[in-house]
Amino acid sequence: MNLDTYLRRIELDKGRIPSFDQYPFTLKVIQHLQSLELHPKVTYIIGENGMGKSTLMEAIAVALGFNPEGGTRNFTFSTAATHSRLHEYMKLVRGVSKPKDGFFFRAESYYNLATNIDEMDREWSFGPPIKDSYGGKSLHEQSHGESFFATFVHRFGGQGLYVLDGREAALSPFRQLAMLSRMHELVQQQSQFIIATHSPILMAYPDSIIYELTSDGIAVNVLEETDHFLIMKEFVNNKERMLTELFRP
């Protein structure tokens, strides 16, 4: 593993966990988690709904010092304290270098982040409006997908550690391809990504590792063997047959 990686590994201190009978410690992924080696460029966390992807991503982000609802480390807003205590039992093994930039992108609370930016920009300040770092236009004045992409293109500046949860939710396939291209630019600028996604397109970054969360724990997988890729491939190649099966009485 590259020593210059910003975040090399996460470890769970199970000996300090008071009980595995309370959420989120009831999740199979947490019960099986010992340590997770992170790729120096891109690490994917995938799996079916309910496997604990967002819970794990949230814990990593909070342990790194990010606001549980998203943004940079400078964001302190809170609309609802719903995050778990998992981060309290997580150890982060960092590399030699420290990132100069960072962002926790959380799709489910992105609206709250955009609102907080607008509220801060309405207050008097010596500096330029915060929205200038996001393309110069209020995120609420753009479509959902446009505002997502604006953050990724304008706010992410390189030499950063970026934690993205559900990033593709509002992006068209074309924009997902554009996001892959932008990811590559940022990786070449010494950036590291941790991404939770369902998108086979976004999983396609070649220099990466894919961790799949299942009821049996965590396994390393390759794109072409994930259910996400196989189901999408089957649908594209055999649409009529699949529709017939789906609509069968």
Image (tube, rainbow, N blue to C red):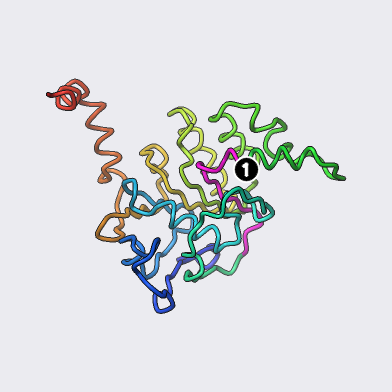
Q: Nearer the viewer, residue 224 or 129?
A: 129
Callout 1: helix, strand or loop? helix
Q: Nearer the viewer, residue 142 or 35?
A: 142
Whole-percent x and y of residue 43?
43, 54
Residue identifier under label 1: 113
Whole-percent x and y of residue 138?
69, 32
Q: From the image, which quarter does the N terminus lie in?
A: bottom left
Vertical placement of 177 versus 227: above or below? above
Residue stretch rendered in magenta on the structure: 98-112
Question: Among all residues in the image, which is located at the extreme top?
Answer: 240
**Picture quadrant where residue 139 is located:** top right
**Picture quadrant where residue 64 is located:** bottom right
Q: Nearer the viewer, residue 189 or 111?
A: 111
- In the rendered image, residue 128 lying in the magenta stretch gets the answer no
Question: Among all residues in the image, which is located at the extreme left?
Answer: 249
Residue at (31, 60) in percent of width and height: 218
Residue at (25, 36) in percent of width and height: 231
- In the rendered image, residue 108 lying in the magenta stretch gets the answer yes
Whole-percent x and y of residue 114?
64, 38
Going by the numbered disc 1, the residue's amino acid type is Leu
Q: Nearer the viewer, residue 127 or 69?
A: 69
Q: Is residue 85 left or right of residue 113?
A: left
